[in-house]
Amino acid sequence: MANTNVGGGAKRPGGLGRLFIRKSVEQMHAEHEHGELKKTLGPLNLILLGIGCIIGTGIFVLTGQAAAAHAGPGILLSFVITGVLCGFVALCYAELASAVPVSGSAYSYTYASLGEIAAWAMGLLLLLEYGLAASTVAVGWSNYVTSLLSENMHIALPPELIAAPGTEVRNAAGEVLGIGVVNLPALLGILGVTVLLTVGVSESALANNIIVVIKVSVILAFIVIGAGYVNVDQWTPLIPERIPSTETEQGRYGWYGVVSGASVIFFAYLGFEAVSTAGAESKNPKKDMPIGIIGSLIVCTILYILTSAVLVGIVPYDQLDVAAPIALAVDRMNLPIFSVLVKVGAIAGLSSVMLVLLYGQTRIFYTMSRDGLIPGLFSSVHKTFKTPWLNTLLVGAVVSVAAGFLSLDALSNLTNVGSLIAFAMVCITVLYLRFARPNMERPFRVPLFPFVPIAGAAMCFYLTYPLLSDPEPRPFFDISFTTGQFFLWYLVLGMILYFVYGMWNSKLAKGQVVTGHEPEPDLGARGLQDDNPPN
């Protein structure tokens, strides 16, 4: 069998073995050690980075939609299911992040274990997880901006400019105001974040930490104050009787609704793995990365369950299918000042999420470009800003278009499918490396092995089923596809790109080992870190 673990002077494989060449873990360590990124992130920074990315559209927007369309009060159980799943996946991420503390997240881990073609597929999945997730967050951000303007400042934007094409725009009373043409606030929000990441802001870590404190304070205030307005009768029945499926719509409620709700609000947990993209900037990644990943997940899981309990206790679950459910709940409390504070906190919080997601996506493309799998312009560094400026501008342009012209449910479903399959591959990677590299240094080891990675992968695939089997077609620009159809075509076209470009330009296949001496973007100082120079 051809040697597929290429590094140093190893013989390069031919035939089908070419598709499964792997970067050695030692090579990745060498790239990390010779890199020029500043190592300034400690465990607290990493936990706040994770919380900053996790708490966003999932809790501020999708919780209400999942309760109304799928789970009812059973959304509490949906959060428990998804929290357990993400706990399994987080443990797997923590082991990989401590053993292979490099940039590129799951893409790099897959390259080291399953080979180049699997790493390419992971890159495609991560584009859905980070790129489309940023678009989804931008739509949620737009919803709270328009709610603040219309309900609290009495400034009504034209309905045609605040929703994706073909989407009905409703007011707080549920009345249809018009049909959307473009979600202009969402588009402009992504462009604003793109400019920020392009020019670089040395104080952005401090700003991110402040925003995290603000939005966690908003969530805590909603839980504490909202608890006094809860009608506990609205928590029963916890799992409403199931409504049968139709040809164009999945069934609601019942246990299947709880599982479907878990699939939808899975988006609320995306972000804990974004900590892994900062491996090259961590002071002590072998210790701090697991703390950052698991710590941020635990904090957010507790907040989510409490928030959803208060939300369905204030507003009947069948009335929560609105653009800004928490805003609706605080408006029902009839506390105008608190309503403004919650919406401002949500807007600030979602802004930080867009920043982190776009940052993560550009870092993944940067790593793939340095490996030769995508064009070199994605790793081109601006001489003044020291950021991958072309990469950032291109990603920002594509993400802004998606935010402006795709609906929230279409974006969130695709993001969840890509993320669930990516997470399953991470769990499989842990299994592979445990057997293929049993003596590799692992400062953090997944407990209860192999149950945790096996259960994590199985649950990911289980939650993917309701999303891919949803028969309801959704508009993707001028064409309607189901989520499953779009995802299939996306993977097919993505793999064609690999065979047309990536396969022939792979530096690993050519024996051109990336040494780390190439100029790297100073994203640490100008992106998401503090501005304390290293000693």
Image (spheres, rainbow, N blue to C red):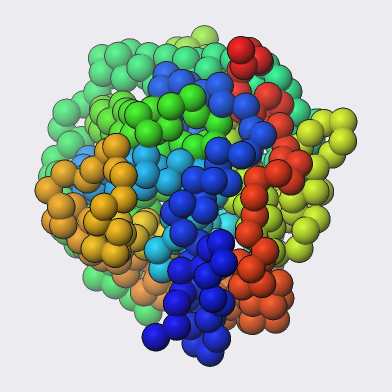
Work out whether residue 267 or residue 506 is closer to the camera in this orientation and state it.
506
Residue at the location (37% across, 79% down)? 247
Residue 282 visible: yes
Q: Is residue 294 above or below residue 160?
A: above
To which quarter of the image does residue 431 belong? bottom left
Position in image of residue 169 (x %, y %): 61, 48
Residue ranking furthest to the front: 9
To which quarter of the image does residue 355 belong? top right
Left or right of 394: which side holds 328?
left
Position in image of residue 380 (x %, y %): 80, 48
Q: Is residue 233 above or below residue 508?
A: above
**How many marks are shown on the rendered structure?**
0
Residue at the location (31% across, 20% down)? 223
Residue ranking furthest to the top: 337
Q: Is residue 280 above or below residue 452?
A: above
Left or right of 400: which side holds 213?
left
Position in image of residue 28 (x %, y %): 51, 50
Residue at the location (53% across, 81% down)? 13
Work out whether residue 17 or residue 57 is closer to the camera in this orientation and state it.
17
Position in image of residue 87 (x %, y %): 25, 43
Residue ranking furthest to the right: 384
Residue 399 visible: no
Work out whether residue 287 or residue 35 is closer to the camera in this orientation and state it.
35
Quarter of the picture holding the C terminus: top right
Residue at the location (41% across, 22% down)? 43
Quarter of the picture holding the N terminus: bottom left
